[in-house]
Amino acid sequence: MPEVEFLPDGRRINARAGVTLLEAARQAKVAIRTRCSGGLGCLMCKVKIVGGAEGLSEPKQAEAAKLGALKGQGYRFACQARVTGQVTVELPEDPLKAAVRAQLKRQQEEEELW
């Protein structure tokens, strides 16, 4: 059974061959943002493949077109990429967490001034 690892958490799951990365993430209880539930309509489930890209199906024409230049940089849409072997996926940082982190950093820099 193919293994999928989700970074930065390091959570791993043995996924059934043929499931999408989005389905594997749900099974692993890893949140990937999406609105269209897998129809390539919202473009929110973009992930970066950092290992084992050969463990995924080839991008179909629609996915490749929507990825554009990012296709050659290791990005895929989780709702379209199907697991065929071992793969490591890096998830983007949640926007809310990023905003909180940035605010905390600004606060820390202001405190250092005093």
Image: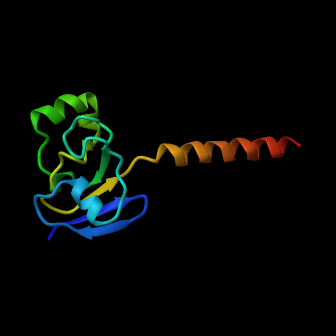
Which residue is at 28% across, 33% downward?
70
The coloring applied to the image is rainbow
Which residue is at 32% across, 46% downward?
48
Instruction: Please identify the quarter of the rendering in which residue 106 is found.
Output: top right
Q: Is residue 66 left or right of residue 109?
A: left
Label count reads 0
- Observer-nearest residue: 98 or 109? 98
**Can you see residue 52?**
no
- Observer-nearest residue: 38 or 103? 38
Which residue is at 23% across, 54% downward?
21
Instruction: Please identify the quarter of the rendering in which residue 20 is found.
Output: bottom left
Q: In the rendered view, would you say 95 is above or below 53?
A: above
Q: Where, quadrant-wise, is the C terminus in this rendering?
A: top right
Measured as percent of width and height from the top left, residue 101 is found at 61, 47
Q: Is residue 110 left or right of residue 81?
A: right
Q: Is residue 14 left or right of residue 11?
A: left
**Can you see residue 5?**
yes
Which residue is at 11% across, 44% downward?
58
Measured as percent of width and height from the top left, residue 72 is found at 24, 36
Q: Where, quadrant-wise, is the N terminus in this rendering?
A: bottom left
Measured as percent of width and height from the top left, residue 42 is found at 28, 35
Measured as percent of width and height from the top left, residue 45 is found at 30, 44
